[in-house]
Each structure stands twice: as C-alpha cells, then as structure tokens.
Image: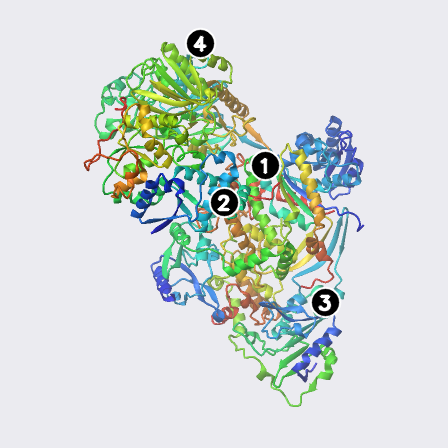
Amino acid sequence: MARVGVFVCHCGENISATVDCEKVAKESGDLNSVVFSTDYKYMCSDPGQTLIKEAIKEHKLDRVVVAACSPRMHEPTFRKACSEAGMNPYLCEMANIREHCSWVHPKSEETTAKAGDLVRTIVEKVKKNKPLQAIKVPITKTAIVIGGGVAGIQSALDIANCGHKVIMVEKQPSIGGHMSQLSETFPTLDCSQCILTPRMVEVAQHPNITLYTYAEIESVDGFIGNFKVKIRRKSKSLDENLCTGCGLCTTKCPKKKIPNEFERGLGNRTAIYVPFPQAVPNKPVIDRENCNYYQKGTCKVCEKVCPVQAIRFDQEDQIIEVEAGALVVCTGFDVLKPNFFPEYGYGKYKDVIDGLQFERLASASGPTKGEIRRPSDGEIPKKIVFIACAGSRDPAKGIEYCSKICCMYTAKHAMLYKHKVHDGTPYVFYMDIRAGGKMYEEFVRRAIVEDDTKYIRGRVSTVFERNGKLIVRGADTLMGAQPVEIEADMVVLASAGVSNPDSEELAQRLHVSYDAYKFFAEAHPKLKPVETNTAGIFLAGACQAPKDIPESVAAASGAAVKVAALFSNSELTREPVVAEVNRQAPPVFSTCTGCFLCEKVCPYQAIEREEIKDRNGNVIKTLARINKGLCQGCGTCVALCRVKAIDLHGFSNQQMYSEVMALLNF
Amino acid sequence: MIRLGFYPGCSMEGGAREYQESVIALAKVFDIELIQIPDWNCCGATAAHNLNKELSLSLPTRILALAEKNELMDIVVPCAACYSRLTVTNHELNKDKSLADKVCDVIDMPYSGNVNVLNIIQFIQKYIADKLEEKVTTPFNYNVACYYGCLLVRPNGILKFDRPEDPQTMDILVKKAGGNAIDWAYKAECCGAGMSVSRTDIVARLSGNIIRDAVERKAEVLAVACPMCHSNLDMRRPEINKFLKKEVDVPVLYISQILGLAVGLDAKTLGLQRHMVAVNLPEKKAEQPAPITNTIKTEA
Amino acid sequence: MSDILINKVKQLLSDKAIDIFIGHGEGTGGRIRPIFVRTPEDAEQLIFNENCKQSWANYLLKPEVKAAGKIGMMATKHALRAMMQLASEFQIKDNEVLALYWDNNELKSSADFKEIEAYLASQNHDILPHEQEMIDKLNAMTTQERWDFWQKEYEKCIKCYACRSACPMCYCHHCAAEGNQPQWIPVASHQLGNMDWHLMRAMHLSGRCINCGACAKVCPMHIPLNLLTYNLITPIQQEFGAIAGMKHDATYALSTFKTEDKENFIL
Amino acid sequence: MENQEFEPKIVAFVCNWCTYAGADLTGTSRIKYGANVKIIRFPCTGRIDFMLLMKAFENGADGIIISGCHPNDCHYSTGNFHARRRWVVFRNLLNFSGIDTERIQFSWVSAAEGFKWADVVNNTIEKVRALGPYENYKKINVPTLFAKEDNNE
Amino acid sequence: MEPIIKIIKSASLATIVDKLKGRYPRLYAPVKKQELVELEVINGFNDIAQDYLLTTQSVKKLAFPRVEKILDYTLQKGNIQQQSPDTSNFPETVLFGIRPCDASGFRSLTAIFNGDKPDEFYKSRYEKLIIISFACNKADAYCFCTSVGGNPGNTEGSDIQFTPVDNDEMLVEILTEKGKAVADLFSDLLSDCDKPVDKQAYLANVPVVFDVNKVIDNTTKSFNNEMLWINQSLRCIGCGACAFVCPTCACFDIQDEQNMKQGARLRLWDSCGFSLFTLHTSGHNPRHIQSHRWRQRLMHKFSYMPEQLKVVGCEGCGRCSRACPVDMNIKEHLLQIAEL
C-alpha cells in the first residue's frame, strides 16, 4: 500500500487568495493511501522543502504530491528535495493549483473544490508511479566529422584540441572543400589558400585526428554516445604508406586532358592526380574511369615510374567500422548545375561562367595564374557582367531562398576584376544588395565607388551571342524598367548555392531531417542551430543553408563545443521518461505482436527489432524494442500500439487511466 | 475520330483565317475533328481585364461554360491571347470559389472549372506529336526561327507551359517535321503586340529587332503560334523594313502551316496565299540542311 | 470449377509443393466450411462454387496450421487482401503461403506478393451496395438515432469474440480487451462492456480492415459489426489515400501522416 | 436544484509542451475561465490514447477538450501530426456510433496562446452547457447498471 | 408424482398465456427478433414466435445470467462496506414454450452448481422457474438429443409439457407439483384424455447416431491422441460462441468493476475455448493451443462430468454447431470418437 504525502502550497497569497488551502490539505488527507497532508506558505522555500523532507522520514512516505505551481516550474525542485530525503525522485508529482486554478478562477467554493479535484487526480496518478532511474548511457569519446571543408576542419581541430579523438571523413581526395578553390575572401581580400592551408596541414598532423580522404559514410547505427559507423574507403589504387607524394606518376600519366574538377573544368588533369598542389594529403589517386589501364587494360605507366612501387591496381574499396559518440555533419553545399539557366547560355557559351570558375580564374594558382582571361580565346575581357541571384530567390526556378553569399562575392569579383583589368568595366545586375555583416556594406560600397562597378538593379532575361559578343539583356528598374542591353566579353553567374546531390541519401543514413531544399534541418532554427533532431548528431557549415566562411566557422566551433560538452562526462544522463515494450517469461516473451506499425510512427527511429531465438538459434518471435538512447518519450507509439505492449514511463497507461478515473469520480 | 472543342476567337474568323484553316486541315490529317463551341463570344482579350475584373472573367467563363455544357472538356485555342485569357480565368475561378460562384451567377450558367484549355502547341503535343514523324512526307528542311512571343508562355506561374525565357516546345515540333530550329535570341521578346495599330513605330522597332536577329542567324522561315505576332511580323513588314533600312522577305508561317506542309498538305489548303510577305520557299533537296550549329566562334 | 481445383491441389500435394491446403468444403445442410487437406486423396472433398466467398486467411497464423508445414490456400479476393495486409504487418513473408485464386475463370496459383498485388489491382474492392446503403442510411440518421440503433445492437452481444476470432486482422496474441492493467474494456458483456469492445475493435481495424465482412457473418447474434469498420474505409481512402490490403509493403494509414492532412474540427 | 444552471464536467487532455504551457500562461496572465475544466497532462498529443477519451465519457464527462501544439510546432516534431490523423478517424467512428462529437473540442494552443486557451475553454463550457448533461452515457454506465434490481440477462 | 395427462385445444393457448401473465410476475417465451429467436419477457400470446425450432441462446441465462452481480461494495478511506444482493427476492418466472432439451439441460447445471455446496444465486433463481416445455415435432440436421439419452418428448426438467397432436389439440402432461399448481389456473380448459395417446407418433424423428457410452469411453481413453484433437479442431477459431449458447456450459469468470467510490463483483460467462481461459499470470498457458481447448471441451462434457457428476454434459440440442462460425458440427466429431 502506497503511503502518499500531500503538500499544499499557498504560494504566498497567489494560491491562498482564491483557494482554501487548508481545506484542500485537510480533505486530501481523507483520500485513500494519503497518510499525511499539510499546507504551507511557500513549499519551494528552504523551510518548505525541509518540511517535505522531514515528513517523508517521519511518516515513511513513499509518494509525494506537491499541490502548488506548474510542474514546468518546480517539478525538478521538489523531485530533488524528495531525492535528498531518500525517496526515488520520480515518485513525486505536482498538482498545478496555481496557473491552472487559483490564478484563473475567482475565490469561491468551486475553485477550492477544483483544487481538491486536481490533488485527488495526481494522488491517484502518483500511486501508479514506479521508481525510475535516470538513464545512464556510456559515451565513446570519439567524434566523426563528415566533410573536410572549412567547417569540418574547424570542428575537428576544436574537438581534437579538447583532447578528444576525431575521425574526419572526406569524400574528395583532399580536404579543403570549396574554400580551397577561392581566390581571395571578402571583406578583407586576404588569400583564401593562405589562411586555409595551414589549418589543413594541422588537421593532417594532429595526433588526435585520423583523416580518411576519398571516403564516405556507408551506414550509421546506434545512438548518442554509441554510434557504430561504417566508412567506405574508396580505393585510391595506391599504398599510401609507401607513397612519398613525389608526383612523378602524375607528370608521366599519358591521359592529360581530363577536365579538372578542382578548376571547375577550366584546366586539365591526369588520370592519376592530386587535385591541387596544396592538397592534404598530398598523395595521388587514380581516377579509374579515365585511366587507360582500367578502361583498356594496358598502360601501367605510373606503376613503372613509381620509385617506391606504391601503385596498387588491384586495391579494393575497404569498409571500416568505427565507434563514435557524436557526429558532426559538415558536408557543405554545391553550386547550381549549369544547364539550369538555358536562357543565360551557361554551357552553350564558353564565356558564361559561374562564380566558382571566376574564383579559379582570379586565383594565383589557377589555370590562368590569376589573370582574368576568358575561357573561349584567352582574351582579357574588357566588359564583364556579373549576374547576381542566378537561380536564387526565384520561385519559378524552385529556389525561393536567398543564397546569401552571392552579393558579397559578386562585389569581390568585380573588385578583383577591376584590380587586375584596370581599363575594364564590370557590371552587376542585382535584385537587392544584401550586405549584412561586419565591414560588408563598406566592402560593397568600395566596389561601387572606388572600383567603379556599374550596379544595375534589375534582372537579366536572356544572354545571347551576337558577333562574338555576349548580349546581356535585362531591365534597369531604377530607370523605370528601361530595357538594357550590354555587349559583354564575359558573363559571370552568381549561381545559387544548393544542397549536395547526395544530401538526401546521407540524411536518411544519418536519420536526420532535411528541408524542402534537401539542406539538413536544425533541431530548432534559433535555439538549437547546430543540433539535429537526432541526439548526438550535429551540423555545421553550408550543409544547413548557404553560409559564408565566418558563419561556417562559428557554427563549426559551436558544434565542436556541443561535442566537447557531451564528451565531458563518461556517461550521459537522461530523463527516464522513455517508452518500453513489455517483456514476459517464455513462451510469451512479450504481448508485442511484432506488427511494427509503431516503427514508422517514431520520430526518432527508436523502435528496433529484436529476434527471440530458441537454443538452436531459430527465430521464435520478432519483437519491437525501444532504444532508450534514442527514445525521447513522446508516447506516440504507446497510443498506437493495439495490444498495449508499449508503455511510457512517467505517463504510463495505468497512470493516465487513474487520472481520468480520479478526475471524474468523486 | 477524336472530337475536341475548338475556340476560334475573333482573329481566326478575320485577319488570321489561314491560321484556322491550317489548324483544321492539320487536325483532319490526324483524324481529329475540331468542333466550334456553339454560340461562342469574345474572350475579352483587350485591356478590359485592367478595368473590370469580373467582366474580364465573365466573358471567358461563358465560353468555358458553353464548352462544358456541350461536353467538350478539351478545347483547342489557337490564338495565344485567347489561350491566355481562358487559362487565366480557369486559374482565377479555381483559386477562389466565391468568385467562381459570383461569375457563374453573372453569366447565369454553371461551370465546374474543369475544362482543359490547350494552346496550339499543347494540342499538337497531346494529340499529334506522337504520330507526326510517321506522317511527314515532305520534310520541312529549312532553317526555322521559332518565335513564341509573350502570351504563350507568360505568366508562367499560371500557364505552367514551357520555359518562359527559353521556350523549346515549338522547336521540338519543327525538328520532328524535318526542320532545323535555329538557336536565336528573340524567341520570347515583345513584338509590339497591342500597339499594332496605334504605334506602328514601336511595332516596327520591336518586331524589327526580332526579324533582324532571325535573319542574321540565317533563318529562312519564322514560325509563330499567335495571330497578333503574325500580323506584326508579317503585315507590318514594310514598316519593319523601313526601320531595318533593308528589304527582308523572310516569310512568317504559323506552326500549323509548317506542320501542314510537312505532312503534304498543299499551300492553298493551308492558306499560305493569304500572307502579306509572300511565301516563296526555295526548292530544297530532300536531305536535311547543313546544320547551323551556332554562329558563335567560341563553340568548338 | 471444383474439379480443376481438386486436380491442382492433388498435384501440389503430391509434388510436395505444399503440405496442407485450406479450402472450401461441404458443411452441414449446405453450409460452406473450411477444410484442411493434407493428402491428395483428401483433396476430393474440396469444392468451389458461387457460395464459396469466405476468406480463410485467419488460419494462416494459427499455430497448429503453421506447424503442418507449407500452406496452400484457396483464396478469395478478400483472403488475398488479408495476406497483403498481414505481410505489411510482417506476419507472413513473401513466398510463404501459396494462394490459389480464380482470375477470369482461370485457376491461378501464386505465392509471390507482386503477382498477387497485380491481380488485386485489377479487381474491384468496393463494399457491397447493400452495405453501403446501410452505412448511408445510418449516416443520414440523427446522432441520437444512431446511438439508439447501436445500443440495441450492442445489447444483443454475448461477447463470444467470434468477430475477433474470424477477423484475419485480429491476430494479436494478447488482445487489448484482455489487458487488465488497467482494465480498459470491462470484461462483462453488459451494454458498456460491449460498446467499449466494439468501438475499440473498430478503431484498431481502421485503416486495416479489408472489408471481408467475416465479423458480421460469424456473429451468432447477427450484429452488423462490419458497418463500424466499413464506414471508416472511405474517409481513410479519401483523406489519406490509403486502402488496406493492396500492397505487401504499404504503410499503415495511422502510422504516417502528411503535413497537409486536412481536418475541419481543430480550432 | 433543478433550477440551477447545469455545470458540465469537462476534461482537457493536453500536451506538456504547448497547451499545458499555454494554460500556464493563461494563469500567469490572470485570464479567467470556468472552473469546470480540469487538465490532464500528457507529454504529447501523440500519447493521447483514444481509449482514454472513451473512459472520460463513461465516467461522467459531459465534454472533452483535446489540445496540443500547432502543426510543425510539436516538441517531438511529428506527434501532433499522428494525433491529428487518429482524431480524424476516431471522430468519424464516434459520430457513426452515435456519440456526440460536438462534445469533443479539438484545438491547437501554443505556449504563447494564453488568451486562446481561455477562449477555447469558455466556448467549450458554453457549448456543452447548451447541449446539457450527457444522458446517453449516464444511462448505460456502470453504477446505473448495478442499481438495476435484477439484471437477469 | 405420477404425470397427469390431459388434452387441450390449441386455440386455448392464448388464454393460458393471459392467465399466466396475470398470475406470475415474469413470463418468458420465444420471440422472433429478425434472424434470431430469443427467450424474452412477453406481454401477450401474440409476442410468441409462431414457428421455431429452438431459441438461439439456451434458457440457462434465466438461472445463470450472462452478467450476475454477486457483491456490492463502497470504498471510503478506512471503511469498505460490502453487501451481497438479496437472493431471496428473485421473481417467480414462467418459461413458456421452451424445448425439452433446454428443460433437461438444467440437470447438468444443477449438478454443477448445486453439487457439493449449493450456489446461492443459481439455486434461488432455478427454484423460482416454472418450466412449460413444448415437445418437438420437427428437428434439423444439427439435432442429436436421442444420441445422448434425450428425446423430442423428454419430460425431464419440465413442470408441464405440451405436445401438439391431431385436431388442433395438444397433449398436456402435468409433471410436477409445481406444474399442477400452474395447471390449476387453467383447469377449466383441460379435458380428460378418453383414450391413450401415442405421444411418440407426434414427435419429430431424431435418429440415434452414436452410442454415448462409446463416446464416453473413447473420450476418456483419447486424452493423449494429439492428432485426433488437432484434426478435429483445426478449423476452430477459438471464439466462445459454442459455450455461450450451450444449455449446460457453466464456466464463469469473476471480475470486479469499480470506480473510485464503489464497485461490484460480477460473475460472467466464460468459455474454455478462449486462449485466456487458462492463461497464467506467469505467461504460461497449460492449454496453449486450440486443440487442447477443444479436447477440454469434449473431455469435460463426456468424461469428467459423467465420471464426477454422473451426468453427460450435453443435451444434443446442436446449438453449438449452429452458432459455430466455421460449422464445427459436434455430432460429426462425437461420431468420429464413437467409431475410434
């Protein structure tokens, strides 16, 4: 038989002004199982809490009901007090007689009666409470950072510098991401490579960081603190331990006309290649699709020239399995595919390029050594048109969002162009200039005023070629929507930043949600900007939405702190409000029927399948099992389960049923 | 025999008779009967929709209601302006039920909002395109500049037809008819449209730019799908030539005429003699014209 | 038709393609009963005629039947739908049960879900006109009239649970009606206990009912129970686009949602 | 007694994160509403079992309020969407069985909608008061059954 | 007592019903309700079904109701009041027009309930019953009363039995003192039987299908014959229809129903066909499959009851087979056992 104590709080006059607290306390003393009841001016005060603690000891209470304010306010307070008196904290419940009673009703008998009803209801509930233990989950103190762009690099370094192990998984042969392709960065115009390369090297050399390039996430199982991750290390056709990175193979490879992805097709590379000179690791991979040996069966020049015999043609993809406590997803973004804007002629006219290609043209290490020369004939363009919002903010094109970085990099491009081609004229077609950020507006202003960039507010309808010139036709909306035609030598599209083509697949592998544009979704847009709805998986950088470098870096550090905080304890403590599938002795095992209709209902993929086997290993039954690490306790599965095989601790069927019965029967 | 509704609108009965003739003749080749919506009225394709919204919707609604009454659920509307008005009306009515009720009240006829309005290209795509290639007897092997104009593809959000700035559907049809649809820059530029009568100077300039670009890119024929475009590019040719300061005699044909020629219909049936700019297409050998890929030097 | 069936089953059994066959047999006074055939000789007892509309899918999960080995079954449209629904709830696996069914007077046999789905897709699955009529009639009543109608029906119920036993979808080892912590459904077959039971059953079958009508057919008290679940079929199909028992991998209508789901009663 | 205005018994089933918090806000804002409504707290609307609603009527509730987070605002991201589907079906079933769905008020009340909560409560009280006591259930509920002198069948 | 034999005009039945109605607080008779014939309280002769074989449910509910309250209690802290219903006040109840197999069914029920220690509720209700049965002049394919020791004119358990004979007349057998007291109400309508009537000639023909003693022997011997029970019950779906319509099935369940204030203890029909019937709290179920439950059903009626209570627990009414959703005709199964 439960021994319940009821403690009615006056909350100064907040409750007692309309509710006769003494009466409530006295009447609740008449309830079944209530062995002690009292009222007090401030239950949450030190003397109030002491009163509860002493009553627990004196009256051997094993259940406590505090009738006071909202449990959202003081439930932790009173549970802690009960715990200090040696009671299981989850055997303490609160009846909300302030927000839901004394404050919303006038002083009357009904109000007091209602307070009594609420107390009775919670007394009946608490009688069905079961002692619960906070869930402790051990934590594997290794983080996996997916993506080796600037966000991934920052995150990995921050976590590693906190003393935790980091595994970085990068899809490309080198880390560095899009930032390594950039020439200069706004608003300072410092060289991108110069600030990034040292950090790339730091990653490679950090004792706490294991780097897997040319690798992808194969699968993710488990839950916060205890992920099991399979990583596919694509074959580089190379023994990395032997390779010294001398580069002889890349110079001797006979296939030399392969468009270089790093140069966005503006330069060429060989079949065995290092994507760019500063690559980390600076060791080549063989692109099998373009390699003579893999395609035609003969060649092996690289093998012959390699001074250390590091080439391995028969090397296969390798799947490695690692354990991790947290994941940081920094997979970045992509730029809108070329044929998206047929009217702008990208892909049709060589001299229509996108922003990233311009970065390569402007880069001192790029295909033109930093000279702005047009791709078609290598001439220096004298008139250049930058088109902002190429795809962004355009519902007709399916991208309603602002890509955010284009205004700034377009201004930067115009500036870089002007700094390199002094007699050239840069034009910018824009919708609005969004230059919110430290020194950003000043930067754009400089492009306009100092570097004489012609900003035209309006959109471009079409770009076509006439007599060797690119005719950019648009409207100048500040001149009464006057049609404008500019005969340009080169056109640069600030193409929209979009999610990676494989982001949806990755999101499903990680069980994190994503938005309509396939960018990964934060758990809360404001208050949980680097968390996902899957505990233990964090986000940083442009995989969430287009972001500039400082934002990506800030998010990366934010995510790193979340990981470090998680790793600061050896165990993770969670509220035990989780669902559980009942278990019984054989031959029943559980009332669960194994229909798994609950599986899809769970927002957290917490419902797993458990096979019950006999001694010979034959499956007798397949049952649902709740992964306590993943379950957040919403109870949606509980209400769905036909056989009531699932129950929710803290809000169990018995508890809720008792509440309904108690509320209505008196 | 497929039976479809047909809404001619004013121009088909007047200045663009050859358009109607060619559409009907072409349909016939493919065993399609086009049935005029009985008692049809003006679509209201004037500036009226800027002045009185309900009136501008009531006129087309009556047409649609009549079509529905006669169980013509797919209607072919060759005139781009009529097509625009009818489609916009469908959109407005389906968007706002109370407005639909009000308009139906005005015309005193019920209308469900379900009549499917097809422009000439949609009609050909849906009912003819699949069988087109097998019916082609005389491939139309000329360089054709397909001109779409404005109303066929805009407003895109409502019409949801083709790409507004770089439409392709007519080009595909021309290619199926054996023609070479050239890549050019004025596909969807304004021809001057409603200024046809009031400001011929503007028409001459706008249409002139179109004709000039087409000719510069070696077009032998312009293909159109709108009577208004046709009249500006064809009838206003003297003014255009004056603006261009040279004599340009490139003919302007309706897409239905081009396809008609390709499937072996004769010039008379298709009403080619009714054009202002004489249609004197040079004899061509049976083989395809040398493909003019692009005039741009940079293209390899 | 019976001969074709008998020969087919004989062959299946002698080929050991199946170990037991569930089919229709002659019962008392012209009734149809399920029979279980284990030998080619016994197959002679099988019949098939226009009265053989019963679905035997509820036997597929019965332990004694499963223990007999590989199961073959004369399957009506409803039995096939029951199979698909059971499959979607992971109760039977592909190629586990061999279903024989008539497709345009041709006896087909398949254990392949895809084939069965294709057959089902070609069939009409509407509930019968007189049943729809009854539903419409009830829906046309006032709420109070409907209450009175059902109370009169519930009063008859003796809680023999034949409805549950005959339903192919009521396969739970431990029905919620038998749960007693808390006692959701009064065990007693008084009006309240009966109503609770029938409402709960209808709710548990919403989106899962394959309208075979077994519940009503077997009711010894002739309660038109099927109407309770049939009435939900149309709204679930219309609102959520879900129809039970058509796909072996279908998602249960109440296991999923669309953000744009419509309702008109939430403030 | 008979002349006294009928005071309906109403049970509110609400989720912890939105409506419960919204009702807390009603309290902190001191907005008044009828004392007939008593709240039962659930973690999420997805947890609300339809059987509990049946039990509420059986045990003498004249009306029921069910309330949770607005669509897309669920603390557990999707619990309310699942709940919404169930309600569509359950409401349909109740209606078909002759149970008065007018007595069940569904609503979305966020943690910021203290005023809305008071409105929902007061309107529901008014509505149920106009409908009167739920006699149908009172006729068949358990105490009545026991009161019968000889229930022979 | 010696039966008193009389003759009555069939047309007088309406008058008899009126007289019974005037004298006794409750009068039950078969009533047609759509597809069902149920034993219901009637207001007059016209309520009675004209043409019926048997009522869908048996008459046992009059002495052993579906739901019977056996205890009332109120709950207050530290004060639990309980009260048993008054069994002395059950009203006198006439069952008019039930069949001989139903009337004789009380023999089994009485053996079970009143065996060693009388069951207060059953006893009190049964004592208040006045049973006026009608002998059967027709039968169907499910009937097999003659195989289990009964017959269509069996008078056992009846107070009065009517048998339709020629000339719109009925043979009246007044069988008990209770019956005599009832018959006194309408003695003016009864005439003496001048010549002996061959009652048998007017009864339905129900052939004997099996020897019940063989069934009893073979059932007892076949407990371990797994395949027999499995094959017989393969199509059994485990519902409780058979048990609930059976005139002799007496298994029940005790349940408390309560809210915060009060509660009642109820006795409810139960069925050995339910898997829950023998389910232990531990999860173990000694009869874990349906064949075991079927075996139990037959063993109980044809082995345990004959052995312990000296009665066969079956009247051959065939209700279970009629109600069975899957046409398990018990006659066939018993025949199979008899022929083992």
- Residue A445 in view: yes
* Residue A450 tag number: 4
SS type, badge 4: loop
Q: Of A242 and E93, which appears nearest the observer?
A: E93
Residue type of the residue flagged with mark 2: Phe
Camera-side mark, 4 or 2: 4
Q: In this rendering, do the residues under marks 2 and 1 share a single chain?
A: no
Q: In which quarter of the image is residue A361?
A: top left
Chain containing the residue with disc 2: A
Residue A158: x %, y % from top left? 48, 19
Classify residue B50 as left or right of residue D30. left
Chain containing the residue with disc 3: E
Camera-side mark, 2 or 1: 1
The CA span between labels 3 and 2 is: 52 Å
Camera-side mark, 1 or 4: 4
* Residue E124 tag number: 3
Q: In this rendering, do the residues under marks 4 and 2 share a single chain?
A: yes
Camera-side mark, 4 or 3: 4
- Residue A148 in view: no
Classify residue A376 as left or right of residue D26. left
* Residue D70 tag number: 1
SS type, badge 3: helix
The CA span between labels 1 and 3 is: 61 Å
Residue type of the residue flagged with mark 3: Ser
Q: Of A466 and E310, which appears nearest the observer?
A: A466
